[in-house]
Image: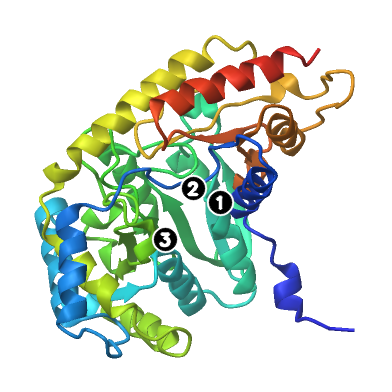
Amino acid sequence: MITLSDRINRLTESETLAMARKSRELKALGHDVINLSLGEPDFFTPDRIKQVAKEAIDQNYSFYTPVNGYLDLRQEICNKLKRDNGLDYCPEHIVVSTGGKQAIANTVMCLVNPGDEVIIPTPYWVSYKQIVNMADGKEVYLDAGIENNFKITPAQLEEAITSNTRLFMFSSPCNPTGSVYSREELKALADVFIRNPHVYILSDEIYEHINFSGKHESIAQFEEIKDRVILVNGVSKGFAMTGWRVGYLAADIEIAKACSKLQGQFTSGTCSIAQRAALEAMLMDPLETKPMLEKFRQRRDLVLGLLEEIPGIQTNKPHGAFYLFPDVSYYFGKSDGETTVKNAPDLCMYILKKVHVALVPGDAFGSPKCIRFSYATSQDLLVEAVDRMKKALEALK
């Protein structure tokens, strides 16, 4: 009998990846599945980025890379942070990683000791909880309901902080809700952190370029707390480069060194060709991503309008990312005569089996009344998906 570690036994499979796997299984059986479970742009990587990657192969970028990333890439990340965000960093503050997820894991592993409290607003991205779990930290959840556009208040934050609080982690624009914190809202949270100098802040900004509300705002802009902010970003969402697996963090030099030290014992440096491609993405004017942003805006508005035609679905209007996170608790306890829907996982499985549309239950994000609906696919498929959902939900009485 194989005996696995307690650490891996505590870990659960990512719900988003689990639904994607179930979708593939149904497709393999010949079913026409519309997969709205993954957070992945349906656009191709820009040609100029692909061309640089091809040139990098011919230029023999085929050797091990520095653990924290090529120096010229780290410099261009600093230039991007100054150009786009008004933030001053040096290459020594930057660690390039194999995706933003690794940057988050590096940070948590380097800062959190067993029993340390980590404050996480709910809804949260699925991996936050599991990464804190692996570090033996203690998650403290702050409920941000749909009535508040899924954003916490400074009063909630102040009340949750204790002497054992080590880290606060959040995303803006948010996965799974699409909520975006304004400068004023971030300043109000920053004021709480100023009064609590023992708390670090992990700011996940991977959806920076998919922001319908105007200029992206980072909590790292407030100098009083900047040395305690770990800013995480990457190229996957804004530049349609999910498969390239390049993320990065910007942090105090001591934190950056610690994350590089940890990464050196796990994966070492990120893929050389992917780093050359990421450098080209850093050089791109953010306006070059605007056509993709406008497509996402059109899709958001389309799906919001379509969902209004389905009784019992409550939505807010997200201002970023490419998700809707509707409250579907109206359907809990209902049945089509064969299947009784008790909760969001039941509802997602019912919709997947009945009409072959893959969604993710909100339980995975800490909000059991909701489901996550990704609109990162074509308008035709979105219309078809909502039409199928409507028919499936109409059968529940």
Neighbourhood count class around disc 3 (C-alpha, 10 Å): few under 14, some 14–19, many 20 upward: some
- Please tell me which residue lies in front, 271 or 147: 271
Query: What residue is drawn where x is 64% and y is 73%?
Result: 136
The amino acid on which the numbered mark 3 sits, given as a three-letter code, is: Asn
Residue located beneath label 1 in the image: 160
Q: Position of residue 194 (x, y in %)?
A: 34, 57
Q: Quadrant of the N terminus?
A: bottom right
Disc 1 marks which amino acid? Ala
Do the numbered discs 2 and 1 sit on residues whose CB atoms are within 8 Å?
yes
* Residue 175 versus residue 56 in the image, above or below: above
Which image quarter holds the C terminus?
A: top right
Which labelled disc corresponds to residue 157?
Answer: 2
Location of residue 120 in the rendering, given as x and y in whole percent from the top left corner:
53, 53
Asked which secondary structure carries label 3, the reply is: loop
Q: CA distance from mark 2 to mark 3?
A: 11 Å
The residue shown at (21%, 52%) is 46
Mark 2 neighbour class, 10 Å CA radius: few under 14, some 14 to 19, many 20 or more: some
Dot 1 falls on a residue whose secondary structure is: helix
Q: Which mark is on residue 196?
A: 3
- Res. 242 image quadrant: bottom left
Residue 299 x, y percent position in the rendering: 37, 26
Alpha-carbon span between mark 2 and mark 1: 5 Å
* Total marks in image: 3
Q: Disc 2 marks which amino acid? A: Leu
Q: Which structural element holds mark 2?
A: helix
Residue placed most toward the observer, 222 or 360: 360
